Image: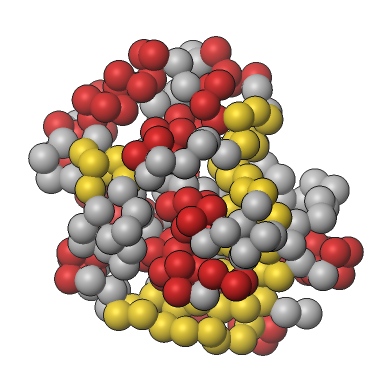
């Protein structure tokens, strides 16, 4: 079987069928925090994971919409940019990419800090954690990041450190469908990449809004599963950003990303 580098795999999936089942590796993670569903991300960062991330990512703050945030990402200078994806020991590293939806959302929070100032914010599907970091930089008092990938929790810790922030609590696992907590704001960057996910998010976010008056902000570059979903009828466009050249190249030519307010 031909094996391609991560970069190709992930962006191919991101554009068309993100999480393509035909390519899922189904590997189990032999990580001590596999059973931890909640914790401070700092407490979940084991030395071997830190070393692996240090060796296989590059610190960067360019080529995206938020140069004020430093992130460890997969770049052309990293071994796994072109290395066979099968050699990667963990799940697909979606956290190693700063997605256009997250970029727009983070830019919007940094430019409009009043939205999260003194608020309790959940970044659902946090990936590298950039939007959670933008919320903290904008004065949110209580920031929680959530992802189904434990390595995203490790990346979040290291990215917080890079930006001189104390690591936020990291909730590992699928919150969608669970009993809703009283978040003031929920932010979701590039989370509408399958019909199933879009449907479940739509229902769950509606409950969050009804139960607690939660404000829901969504960043998306116009992915098919988002623009074709019934959620569109309840969206209010807040702003649109042109994507930097590098992000365009890495995202199959997507030229812009939009921030939406979801209201019921
Ligand atoms: C396309 S990435 C976006 C990451 C980040 N928000 C950004 O914009 O850069 C999607 C992320 O959602 C996570 N994810 C997928 N399904 C999830 C779920 N049900 N709950 C929480 N996170 C999930 C993935 O692991 C991945 O990190």
* Residue 193, position as x, y percentages in the image: 50, 61
Quarter of the rendering containing residue 169: top right
Instruction: Please say if 47 is above or below 256.
Output: above
Q: Nearer the viewer, residue 222 or 66?
A: 66
Whether residue 1 is visible here, answered yes or no, is no
Instruction: Please say if 256 is above or below 169.
Output: below
Q: Residue furthest left?
A: 77
Q: Nearer the viewer, residue 2 or 42?
A: 42
Residue depicted at x 69% and y 60%: 119
Q: Residue furthest right?
A: 211
Residue depicted at x 52% and y 75%: 112
> Quarter holding the N terminus?
top left
Q: Nearer the viewer, residue 166 or 144?
A: 166
Instruction: Please say if 158 is above or below 22.
Output: above
Say left or right for 113 vs 21: right
Instruction: Please say if 156 is above or below 49.
Output: below
* Residue 214, position as x, y percentages in the image: 76, 66
Say left or right for 122 vs 132: right
Quarter of the rendering containing residue 114: bottom right
* Residue 204, position as x, y percentages in the image: 76, 60
> Quarter holding the C terminus?
bottom right
Whether residue 103 is visible here, answered yes or no, is yes
Give the image's coloring scheme: secondary structure
Residue depicted at x 74% and y 62%: 184
Say left or right for 227 vs 143: left
Residue depicted at x 46% and y 33%: 157
Quarter of the rendering containing residue 47: top left
Q: How many marks?
A: 0
* Residue 36, position as x, y percentages in the image: 65, 22
């Amino acid at each position: 079987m031909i094996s391609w580098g991560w970069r190709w795999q992930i962006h191919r999936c991101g554009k068309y069928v993100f999480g393509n089942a035909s390519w899922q590796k189904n590997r189990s993670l032999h990580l001590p925090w596999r059973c931890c569903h909640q914790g401070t991300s700092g407490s979940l960062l084991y030395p071997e994971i830190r070393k692996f991330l240090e060796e296989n990512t590059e610190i960067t703050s360019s080529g995206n919409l938020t140069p004020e945030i430093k992130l460890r990402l997969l770049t052309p200078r990293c071994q796994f940019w072109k290395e066979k994806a099968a050699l990667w020991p963990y799940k697909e590293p979606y956290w190693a990419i700063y997605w256009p939806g997250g970029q727009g959302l983070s830019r919007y929070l940094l430019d409009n800090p009043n939205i999260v100032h003194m608020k309790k914010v959940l970044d659902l599907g946090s990936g590298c954690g950039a939007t959670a970091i933008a919320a903290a930089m904008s004065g949110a008092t209580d920031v929680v990041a959530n992802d189904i990938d434990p390595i995203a929790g490790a990346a979040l810790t290291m990215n917080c450190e890079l930006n001189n922030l104390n690591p936020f609590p990291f909730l590992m696992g699928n919150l969608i469908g669970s009993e809703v907590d009283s978040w003031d704001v929920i932010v979701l960057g590039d989370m509408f990449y399958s019909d199933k996910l879009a449907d479940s998010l739509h229902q769950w976010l509606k409950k969050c809004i009804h139960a607690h008056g939660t404000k829901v902000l969504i960043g998306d570059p116009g992915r098919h599963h988002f623009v074709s979903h019934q959620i569109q009828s309840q969206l209010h466009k807040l702003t649109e950003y042109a994507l930097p050249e590098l992000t365009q190249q890495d995202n199959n030519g997507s030229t812009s990303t939009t921030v939406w307010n979801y209201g019921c």
